[in-house]
Image (spheres, rainbow, N blue to C red):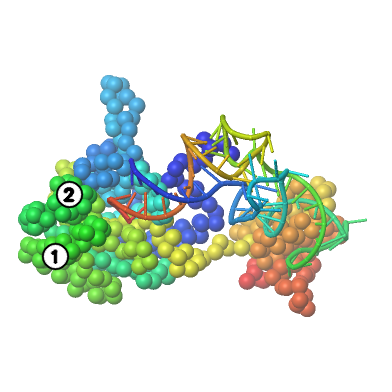
Amino acid sequence: MPEQYRALQGFKDILPEDQPYWRFIEETAAEVARLYGYQRIDTPVLEDTSVFRRTSGEATDIVEHEMYSFDDRADKEGRRQNISLRPEGTAGVVRAYLEHGMFKLAQPVKLYYLSMSMFRRERPQAGRLREHHQFGCEALGEGDPAIDAEIIGMLYQIYTRLGLQNIRVRLNSIGDQNCRPQYIEKLKEYYQPLLSDCCNDCQTRFHKNPLRLLDCKNPQDQKKIAEAPRITHNLCEPCQEHFATVQRYLKFYDVPFEVDTLIVRGLDYYTRTVFEFTSTVDNVALNGGGRYDGMAEIFGGPHTPGIGFGVGIERVILEMKRQGIVPPAEAKPTAFVVYFGKSQEMTDTAARLTAELRKAGLKALTTYGGRSTKAQMKQANASGATFSIIIGDDELANGTVVVKNMHIGPESSENKQVSIKQSELLSYLREHQQ
RNA sequence: GUGACCGUAGCUCAAUAGGCGGAGCUCUGGAUUGUGGCUCCAGUGGUUGUGGGUUCGAGCCCCAUCGGUCACCCCA
């Protein structure tokens, strides 16, 4: 296969063998989301670049060097719009909320999206792709901390239903427009005299995005982080109360969370509550989320509090595999029609019976192209079908079929096959399947 | 963007010291001309990622390039 016809770097085909994981996660997530009153939305994969730029923040890594952005073809006036593949889901949903006037509906408006593609031009590695998929929820138009707890509780319930264990839930509050600027000043004051002793990354963080100083993993800086002022000790009164209430409500959902004052998140739009669920194996984030009370105003909309999260489906699948969780398998066929002979009457009969079973809603397979009897039976066996439906010359002559139970093993003395009228096939299968 | 490791059949991997490219699985056919699983036999499948170099001779050594994996950065 010439390399030019391979999938692009960081892009992956999702093969049939992995599809059961996807279906299991999608069905579980959607079911729980509906339980909490969320409604599905799908937004376009392309948006005007400013939708992401203005919300995520100009100086974030995602916007600065990870977006797939390009000029669209020129319109009639020769203008070119710069558009981008979405790197995250929230901005598009908020854009849609405003565009369709959903702020006029009863609030909050609770939306979820399923397996939407996200694109970031990073170097791929385990659990990180250039196209990945997220399931996400956004609750718009409600600032009550109860909804923060609700959304985290819902997420936890989804993981529980998937069978995942040992998931770390980490929670923090990064304040709002009132208290965060003051905290950042305090943090910079603290770091200023230590800066010359900090790693290179931290030196740039200090100027570019001071909150990220707390994110440094360099050993030489850990002590500085440990003694740095905490955001949670510097929240304004309303933020403090909000955070306390979130934690109180969270207990109702039995979520074993820990407050981690060091999680800050990579997007600028977050306010107050932020959270991450991580695998305990490698601490990699399975999802991230938080409150973004200022986003709608960035788009010129009315003040609209909001909170949401995005779950990385590929990462959840990785974690499920690590924990040995096997998703429900695809249903096996009820019947596999085989036929011995190549006459038109024979092939017509096999095709007709197969079609009738399918029209009746049974999962039925058959063979094509007149293979040997043994080969057909092998195919029937490999398909996992409960019954093979066997048609030979004798059956053709008297309008019957042989129904053979493929699940009865070779060592069993149990009767494996019966001859029945073709007209009784459907009712026989309905009666005897599983 | 930085770094490390790895590229042999559809998949998982062999190939003595640089000396005729192999096996298992899968797939196809057969052993049993109308009956699967177990077993046995046979077959299909390769420009050893690509291009150059060293050598009498390169899957193996050297250089380049492309791709993959992993880590850093960052993130889901």
Instruction: Pinpoint residue A50: horizontal percent, then vertical percent.
Output: 24, 38
Check disc 1: other Cα within 10 Å, few if <14, some if 14-19, many if 20+: few
Check disc 2: other Cα within 10 Å, few if <14, some if 14-19, many if 20+: some
- Check the residue under mark 2 and report the chain it is in: A
Q: Nearer the viewer, residue A360 or B6?
A: B6
State the residue at coordinates (13%, 59%): A175
State the residue at coordinates (6%, 65%): A237
Q: Which numbered circle lies on residue A203?
A: 2
Task: Name which quarter of the figure residue A361 lies in.
Answer: bottom right
Task: Name which quarter of the figure residue A261 lies in.
Answer: bottom left
Q: Is residue A62 above or below residue A194?
A: above
Q: Is residue B64 left or right of residue B75?
A: right
- Check the residue under mark 1 and report the chain it is in: A
Instruction: Pinpoint residue A174: horizontal percent, then vertical percent.
Output: 16, 59
Q: Which numbered circle lies on residue A227?
A: 1
Quarter the N terminus of chain A occupies: top right
Quarter the C terminus of chain A occupies: bottom right
Q: Is residue A143 left or right of residue A394?
A: left
State the residue at coordinates (31%, 48%): A88
- Amino acid identity at mark 1: Glu
Q: Nearer the viewer, residue A62 or A419?
A: A62
Q: Secondary structure at mark 1?
A: helix
Instruction: Pinpoint residue A66: horizontal percent, then vertical percent.
Output: 31, 42
* Spatial separation of the CA atoms under disc 1 and disc 2: 18 Å
Please report whichever mark, 1 or 2, sits nearer to the chain's N-terminal start: 2
Instruction: Pinpoint residue A166: horizontal percent, then vertical percent.
Output: 36, 71
State the residue at coordinates (83%, 60%): A395
Q: Secondary structure at mark 2?
A: helix
Task: Name which quarter of the figure residue A365 lies in.
Answer: bottom right
Q: Pick out the residue farthest to the top.
A: A77
